[in-house]
């Protein structure tokens, strides 16, 4: 994947997220207005409200993970934890242990790494991002870890192979090594228990 192609894809991701955030936010605002107008808060309203909140959280996450990034922009720990706290609320949780702000491109790499980690914990677990010796470390723990070796091999393979057999749900395994190459951060992977990715 060439740099111009990755940037073009990131622009598309940014555009899609930008255009969807407003209407999804409008749904949430409309639900609040309905509540103020005295509309009963039944299970149907709760379902719509939960779905709108989840969609908004996913869009915020995807905007960072798949959008255009820049080293000139920093994202603070409070904003990062806010985004992750809205995403990882069910069987998979996330522990962001870094307190300092990070360049947006590094946060993008971390978010893509988290998506990789999700694939290893289909039965639930914890994704931890920590910092050590100038690198970020993703640690994946959980019941019955099942990392797909072919996907994880893409992160360290100089020639990650044909992308035609890569599913949409695993696109992060193709995007992350390209981004890490641009950042000058080689990836080191261990598929033992726990699964770790250092970059």
Image: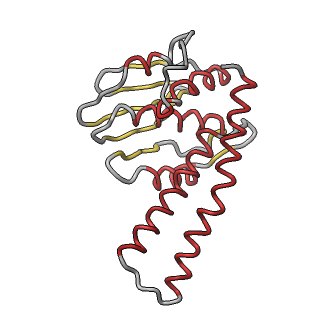
Q: Position of residue 176 (x, y in %)?
A: 56, 27
Residue at image position (24%, 32%) is: 144
Residue 44 sits in which quadrant?
Answer: bottom left
Q: Position of residue 151 (x, y in %)?
A: 44, 21
Tell which of 19 and 88 is nearer to you. Answer: 19
Residue at image position (42%, 49%) is: 88
Q: Position of residue 43 (x, y in %)?
A: 35, 74
Q: Is residue 142 left or right of residue 154?
A: left
Determine the residue located farthest toward the front in the rendered image. Answer: 164
Residue at image position (48%, 28%) is: 167
In this rendering, is residue 99 above or below 146? below
Determine the residue located farthest toward the top in the rendered image. Answer: 159
Instruction: Please say which color scheme the image uses.
Output: secondary structure
Residue 118 sits in which quadrant?
Answer: top left
Tell which of 124 and 30 is nearer to you. Answer: 30
In this rendering, is residue 161 above or below 20? above
Tell which of 71 and 64 is nearer to you. Answer: 64
- Circle count: 0
Residue 94 sits in which quadrant?
Answer: top left
In this rendering, is residue 60 above or below 171? below
Residue at image position (27%, 39%) is: 123
Q: Position of residue 76 (x, y in %)?
A: 61, 49
Determine the residue located farthest toward the bottom in the rendered image. Answer: 38
In the rendered view of the protein, which quadrant contains the N terminus?
Answer: top right
């Amino acid at each position: 994947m060439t740099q111009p192609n990755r940037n073009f894809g990131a622009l598309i991701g940014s555009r899609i997220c930008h255009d969807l955030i407003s209407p999804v936010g409008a749904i949430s605002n409309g639900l609040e207005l309905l509540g103020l107008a005295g509309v009963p808060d039944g299970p149907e309203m709760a379902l719509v409200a939960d779905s709108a909140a989840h969609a908004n959280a996913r869009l915020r996450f995807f905007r960072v993970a798949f959008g255009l990034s820049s080293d000139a922009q920093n994202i603070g720990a409070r904003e990062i934890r806010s985004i992750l706290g809205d995403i990882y609320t069910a069987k998979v949780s996330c522990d962001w242990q870094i307190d300092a702000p990070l360049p947006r491109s590094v946060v993008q790499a971390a978010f893509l790494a988290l998506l990789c980690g999700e694939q290893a914990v289909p039965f639930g677990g914890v994704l931890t991002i920590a910092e050590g010796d100038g690198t970020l470390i993703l640690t994946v723990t959980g019941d019955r870890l099942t990392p797909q070796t072919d996907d994880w091999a893409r992160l360290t393979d100089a020639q990650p192979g044909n992308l035609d057999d890569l599913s949409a749900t695993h696109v992060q395994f193709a995007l992350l090594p390209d981004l890490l190459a641009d950042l000058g951060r080689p990836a080191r992977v261990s598929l033992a228990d726990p699964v770790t990715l250092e970059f």
